[in-house]
Image: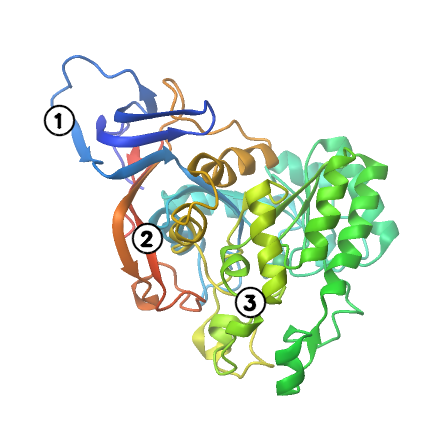
Amino acid sequence: MNQPSTSTPTLIHNGRCCDPATNQEWVGDLYLADGKIAAQPDDLPPGTRIVDATGCLVTPGLIDVHVHLREPGGETAETIASGAAAAAAGGFTTIVAMPNTQPPIDTPKGVRYVLDGGRQAGATRVLTTACLTTGRAGTAVAPLAELAAAGAVAFTDDGCTVQDDAIMRTAMQRAAQLGVPVMDHAQDRVMECQGGALHAGRRAAAWGWPGIPAEAETRIVARDIALARETGAALHIQHVSCAASVDLIADAQQTGVRVTAEATPHHLWFCEDDIDPARPDAYKMNPPLRTAADRGRLQSGVCEGTLALFATDHAPHPMAEKAKGFVAAPFGVVGLETAMAATYSLLVATERMPLMRWLRAWTTAPAQLINRPAPSLAVGQTADVTVFDLGVDWQVVADHFVSRGRNTSFAGQQLTGKVKAVFVDGWRIDSR
Ligand SMILES: [Zn+2]
């Protein structure tokens, strides 16, 4: 990128500023200078950019700990640059890439490739995870110390689960020694029923398609919790999909196990009853959409704080791949450009969740998970800021996405709140 050495001083004017890190909320101005939140001078320097934030929420930039950028190897679906731009368009100033690329991110060189690509993109900050096991094959623990030294913020074989308990135990012991969290896509491969395409419930039965039972998830969640208790590792359960998992996680947290968990906007919003069998692009993901009761427990789980983080599991695929029919199409939906508005509309606009708690689940909680300083609007902090216009109601149109992915569950949905501006290090990121 060819940028001058300092960002333009900026006054974000008359917004509703909410800072979960300090629990402060005020209506007024926020001044950004030299990449930091700064005290507002009596006289603004010439050339100061003014952003009118009347009717907008002004918050520390959001963090998404679960993003598939597809590069290297899957650039038709997304690139590091297109994903980072989509993230900025969605209000995220930091994203964490998953390592299930081609090749998988299981070497220090691979970690550096993603981090360098993120820096070159010059949009949202790109961090990355690395594999728990070499090649995500589940048979040999990856060189975790070297991967952490190269900059990996967590270890995961996302998309796969380490099935062998002994390998998982060794991986968690090493991660605990390094102080790096283990994120797990919890799914028992045997119980998943090879070829399962959706929840093993009434829709799978009606259509005669192979299903993935909820027990495939809860069995591994229980195993992982037992191993976290034994090893002291920081365990994070990715994209929780069913009620029994939430209950297991709540019990474990009460007895002092280091376990956190995330919920995705699509699992909170939709359930198996919503599935259109002709639309794998919108409704086929792993783990699958489950019952209305499961969705209700996920919602109560985020409201009570058992699931302390939101994360998108942004998973772009070319539409040609998604057109192969429900059973043959790949798993996954995009999420970066709808997640902030979807969770706000579902939980805050309906007064089910306080605004500050919602923001914590997108800012301080994910920062804590990946051992980063809590993002904050306090003077002296890094100027990573999102301006979210609460006065805009909009309908999701996939063709308007900055992401290369069009495979969204939210097409046609009416959402409240739209990202107006995003600043990273004080730079305004214009994705469009
Ligand atoms: Zn996953």
* Mark 3, other Cα within 10 Å: few <14 / some 14–19 / many ≥20: many
Q: Earlier in the sequence, mark 2 or mark 3?
A: 3
Q: Real-space Cα distance between discs 1 and 2?
A: 33 Å
Q: Quadrant of residue 332?
A: bottom right
Tell me the mark number nearer the camera, choosing from 1 and 2. 2
Q: Is mark 1 within 8 Å of ligand 1?
A: no
Label number found at residue 416: 2
**Near-viewer residue (354 or 315):** 354
- The answer to whether the residue bearing label 2 lies less than 8 angstroms from the nearest atom of ligand 1 is no
Q: Quadrant of residue 212?
A: bottom right
Q: Amino acid at mark 1?
A: Gly
- Residue position marked by numbered label 1 in the rendering: 47
Report the mark closest to the observer, 3 or 1: 3
| Ligand 1 location (quadrant) | bottom right
> Rounded to the nearest whole Å, what is the CA distance between mark 3 and mark 1?
50 Å
Identify the residue at the far top of this view: 42
**In-front residue for pair 415/329:** 415
Q: Amino acid at mark 2?
A: Thr
Q: Position of residue 313 (x, y in %)?
A: 54, 56
Q: How many marks?
A: 3
Position of 177 compared to 423: left or right? right
Extreme residue toward the left, this view: 46
Q: Is residue 141 left or right of residue 323?
A: right
- In the rendered view, how is the structure colored? rainbow
Q: Which mark is residue 271?
A: 3
Mark 2 → mark 3, Cα distance in angstroms? 21 Å
**What element does badge 3 sit on?**
loop
